[in-house]
Image: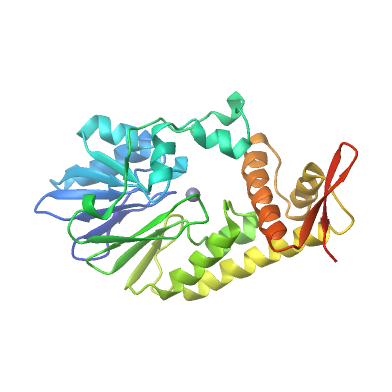
Amino acid sequence: MFELHKVGERTYYVEAPTNMGIYRYGEKEVCMIDGGSDSAAAREALSRIEEQGWTLKLVLNTHSHADHSGGCAYLKEQTGCEVYAPKTEASIITSSLLNPTYLYGGYPMSELRTKFLYMQPCECGALSAEILPKGIEYVMLNGHSFEMAAFKTSDDVWFIADAVMSVETLTKYKISFLYDIAEHLRSLERLKTLEGKLFIPSHSKPLEDVTELADYNRRSVIEVADSIKELCRGGISLDGLLEKLFQLYNIRLYLTQYALVGCTTRSYLAWLYERNEVRPVFEGTSLTWKTVE
Ligand SMILES: [Zn+2]
């Protein structure tokens, strides 16, 4: 863990539960792609950078989830580096209570205000082409989060963040976190059109070809949506639906998981609603979700 892997003339990554990219754009100047899950992970990455005699100048975050941006405050404090993320995500990194707040859908209780969801806030600027170091470009692959950037280095290496989950992760958790299903499906198609030598997801090994995994991720989304439609056939409340999904996919229930799967399930309902596949049924003061037959 935390080894430095060289994957191109100027491109490296530090292997971790959330991989961190490193790109050397000057003689000694480097940028990181994602700031790590917390200060401990960030410290390891910074040690790898300093061992090489390099200087960290900026961090480009793919998105605001705590496991990707939780180390930014530490990195900025230690090095004075600049920190950037796509605009909406930059707001969340700067005001990080927003993260557990939107996941839970209200003020989050203390169990949801730990580093897994509520990272140390860090002043973060909006990502744009102008701030990029020479040799880096990006495309947006939204859906997993409000906005998510995938970065490509001059070595034709893509850092694709959480645009795809591994087969192992999807088999284990089944419902992986998604904010906007329609955008996510569009991003999976876009991902398949990207050209590069290597694709590095945040939570699994690098891949030379991402097409098969993108298709697997698409099928997994459709499978979850089909399960939700099946469970809504007789009409079911949101909490009833969550209970059934937790049973069906054997997911352990605790508050963090309730927030993550709850947010994702609401997003699935919104997507199915827009496709006219489920509808809300109001009976007196009860709201149930029912599949349109
Ligand atoms: Zn994420």
**Viewer-proximal residue among 275 and 23:** 275
Location of residue 45 (image quadrant): top left
> As drawn, which residue projects farthest toward the left?
27
Q: Position of residue 273 (x, y in %)?
A: 72, 57
Q: Residue at x 23, y 31 (%)?
A: 78
**Viewer-proximal residue among 265 and 29:** 265
Location of residue 192 (image quadrant): bottom left
Q: Position of residue 96 (x, y in %)?
A: 45, 33
Question: In the visual, does 101 lie left or right of 258?
Answer: left
| Figure colour scheme | rainbow
> As drawn, which residue projects farthest toward the top?
110
Q: Residue at x 19, y 43 (%)?
A: 57
Q: Residue at x 15, y 46 (%)?
A: 54
Q: Quadrant of the C terminus?
A: bottom right
Question: In the visual, does 52 lie left or right of 285?
Answer: left
Q: Position of residue 175 (x, y in %)?
A: 64, 55
Q: Residue at x 18, y 65 (%)?
A: 9
